[in-house]
Amino acid sequence: MRRICVITGTRADYGLLSPLMRRIGETADLELQVIATCMHLSERFGMTVRLIEDDGFRVDARVEMLPEDDSPLAVASATGTGTTRIAEALARLSPDIVVILGDRFEALAAATAAFLLRIPIAHIHGGEVTLGALDDGLRHAITKLSLLHFASTERYRERIVQMGEDPTRTFAVGAPGIDNVRTTPLLDRAALSSELGIPADVPLVLATFHPVTLGEDDESAQQFAELLAALEETHRFVVFTRPNADAGNAAIHRLLDDWVTARPEGRAAFAALGHQRYLSLASAADVVIGNSSSGIIEIPALGTPVVDIGSRQAGRIMPAAVVHSEADRAAIRAAIARALSAEHRAAMAASANPYGDGHATERIVEVLRTADISRAALRKGFHDLHGNSS
């Protein structure tokens, strides 16, 4: 019986990990452990640990590590705190494999703790590039600490191998978020209206905007202000999901609060929707707007057009559903018009989503069941593309 410890820090990564967690729990020779940390344990961000428990999962450890404020120093300090506290939880739980998804500071803390405790790490969504965020460096660092790699596309798998990782431990499985799209029963507009208090009979826009962590100090707020200005003229009801805990989030929260308060009959903002309501809103929306990775990976699989703003996701493989826009109100309005056009929808219908077929979790679980995770396997070599591997 292998103990598989899944570490989750945000509503976003939990939404992607939940199908995998369920499949691990249902697999006879695997035991699921769950560590919830960071944003999951904050009322300000929706206390989303409750979503995990409401879905029927036992949370084996709660690790407090949310930054005290949204400054870079606070995020760096929280990473150190998280490393210590996650290490203590892992030492107590003694898992055989730790599963980490993505590229955030709490993911790096978890990977550092597991690596130093000599616990094999399975990393999901490595090999990707996001030029507008610190996530890029964090993701690649986690890759080098990990033993098993689950990439969302073949190109990303090749990048991981290019970083010196063993090709036999690096797998192109697809994106787990597509599994959610394939399997989640979506709510209709009446149910969404009842649960969220939004109109059931008007066109919708769904939006998410996270801090631009490699920009200037006020760049996130400037870009977000341009997005809000672009949305001023829309005749659709606008639903925002609030930003994550990255440095610079406070200014976005303040601008969003003021914007919603100015016209609450046409706007709403939520700290956490849960993946069913989020996907249902995205499916019902005329367009999804912002700079979240979900707009690049999951939303196109729903058949909803996407406007991606600014540099945060620059470098990712973009499905045909995505229209990119600079963070300028005129450019955003033009991108929205293009995304809503018949020509764009025709192009979407004629293309396949590059992030897989919705069966990533099955492939991941099979590797978790069978991979060599002995101490000898932890002594990784460096796979040299020029034939000098050691």
Image: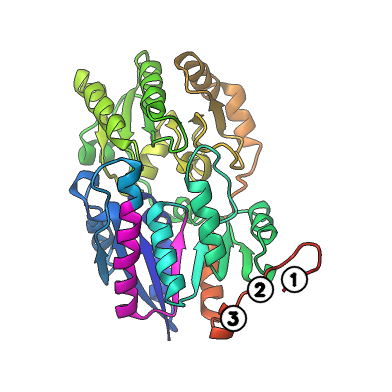
User: Do residues under tags 1 and 2 come within 8 Å of each other at their CB atoms?
Assistant: yes
- Magenta span: 77-102
Instruction: Classify residue 65 as left or right of residue 110.
Output: left
Could you say which disc has been placed on residue 377 in the image?
3
In this rendering, is residue 303 above or below 388? above
Q: What separation in Å lies between label 3 and label 2 (alpha carbons)?
A: 9 Å
In this rendering, is residue 167 above or below 138? below
Q: What separation in Å lies between label 3 and label 1 (alpha carbons)?
A: 15 Å
Locate residue 134, reporting x and y percent: 47, 44
Q: What separation in Å lies between label 1 and label 2 (alpha carbons)?
A: 7 Å
- Secondary structure, mark 3, is helix
- Indicate the quadrant where residue 151 lies: bottom right
Query: Given the image, on which type of amino acid does mark 2 rest?
Result: Gly
Could you say which disc has been placed on residue 381 in the image?
2
Front-lying residue, 316 or 249: 249
For label 1, the residue is 389
Query: Given the image, on which type of amino acid does mark 3 rest?
Result: Ala
Q: Residue at x 56, y 69 (%)?
A: 148
Please indicate, yes or no, whether residue 264 appears anywhere in the rendered image.
Answer: yes
